[in-house]
Amino acid sequence: MDAVIVDTNVIVIANDIDDKRKDCRDRCQERIEQIIDQHEKVVVDDKWRILGEYKDNTRPNTRKGIGDLFVKRLLQNLGNPNICTTVHITPLVENGTDFVEFPNDDNALASFHKKDRKFIAVALAHKQDVGQAPVILLAIDRGWLQFADALANYEASVDLICEEDMQRPRQERKGR
């Protein structure tokens, strides 16, 4: 079974009811449905850094968007290794953004967004545990694009669900 890490923006866009990003929203919903149908399992960290971000951006107990249902399912199945795997990542300092597992000494990744480092750290910790890094699912965060080659050096790959949206100028994406 393939393992994935889901960036929070995939969940947020899947819940979006605005039609500005309908194509991207539909693709995010399809990917989440694929995960829910147990074609892939989700990898998160054991200290709830990722799950906490999910919960801050969804309402798993009150709303009924596919992103909300996805988060609720993860929370209900944290102990089920067919649905969710947790890995330990080691903070370098207590700021919650720097981790031993992140390639901190790689200059090509020095400006990688601090709040997204947990996703890379989880991917590389999982790789260390099982020998293969899970794919990181990403919807629209253009900040990751410049780091794709550097991340590939660590076998951390990103699946750009809404790549066409990320390639268009920001004004065009908002107007759709």
Image (cartoon, rainbow, N blue to C red):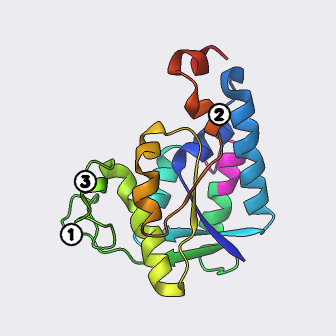
Question: Residue drawn 65% across and 45% down?
Answer: 161
Circle 3 crowding by C-alpha within 10 Å: few under 14, some 14–19, many from 20:
few
Name the image quarter holding the N terminus: bottom right
Q: Nearer the viewer, mark 3 or mark 1?
A: 3
* Pointer 3 or 1: first along the chain: 1
Q: Tag 1: residue type?
A: Leu
Q: Is residue 33 or residue 138 the one in the foreground?
A: 138
- Image marks 3 and 2: residues in contact by CB distance under 8 Å: no
Q: Which residue is mark 3?
A: 110
Which segment did they paint magenta?
59-70
Q: Which residue is mark 1?
A: 92
12 to the left or right of 141: right
Instruction: Return the x and y of residue 162 as percentages of the image width and height.
Output: 64, 39
Taking the magenta stretch, the answer to whether it contains residue 50 is: no
Q: Nearer the viewer, mark 1 or mark 2?
A: 2
Q: Is residue 75 above or below residue 175?
A: below
Question: Residue drawn 25% across and 53% down?
Answer: 110
Q: Which residue is mark 2?
A: 164
